[in-house]
Amino acid sequence: MDLGPFGKLSIEASVDGDERFMCVSKRCTATDEPYRLFLEAEAVLAWRTGELIQNAFPELPAEEREFLLTGLTPAEQDVFYANFQED
């Protein structure tokens, strides 16, 4: 999934051959480490076909849902949003 300036997310259709799960990942520019989310394929399909992300993934914290929407890892979000905080 191409997110323009935020980079590309890699999506694996199964995890260790288990079709019930997907892995969404990218290399974090803030930490230079891989960042991965393991998600139920059924929830990904629901979200990608119109379900609100908070309904498709109620168990995920807001930072992980933001990663799926924007491609910003939690560490990148910290750096990005720090620029907008008032002194």
Image: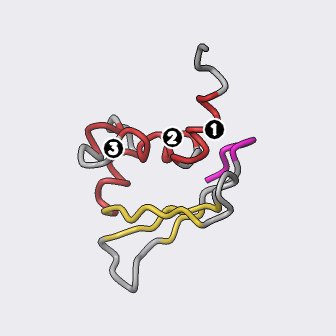
Name the residue type under label 3.
Pro
Q: Is residue 19 above or below residue 68?
A: below
The residue that mark 1 highlights is 79
Determine the residue positioned at 41% across, 68% down. Answer: 22
* SS of the residue under disc 1: helix
The residue that mark 3 highlights is 61
Alpha-carbon span between mark 1 and mark 2: 17 Å
Kindly report which numbered mark, 3 or 2, lies closer to the viewer in this rendering: 3
Determine the residue positioned at 43% across, 42% down. Answer: 63
Which residues, given as a range, are shown in magenta? 1-6
Q: Where residue 55 sits in the image (x, y, percent)?
A: 26, 38
* SS of the residue under disc 3: loop
Kindly report which numbered mark, 3 or 1, lies closer to the viewer in this rendering: 1
| Residue 17 in which image quadrant | bottom left
Within-10-Å neighbours for mark 2: few <14, some 14–19, many 20+: few
Reading the chain from its start, which is encountered first: label 1 or label 2?
A: 2
Q: Where residue 2 sits in the image (x, y, percent)?
A: 67, 50
The residue that mark 2 highlights is 69
Determine the residue positioned at 39% across, 44% down. Answer: 49
* Residue 37 relative to residue 10: left or right: left
Reading the chain from its start, which is encountered first: label 3 or label 1?
A: 3
Name the residue type under label 2.
Leu
Judging depth in this view, the residue of 17 and 75 nearest the camera is 75
| Residue 50 in which image quadrant | top left
Q: Is residue 60 magenta?
A: no
| Residue 80 in which image quadrant | top right
Reading the chain from its start, which is encountered first: label 3 or label 2?
A: 3
Alpha-carbon span between mark 3 and mark 1: 18 Å
* SS of the residue under disc 2: helix
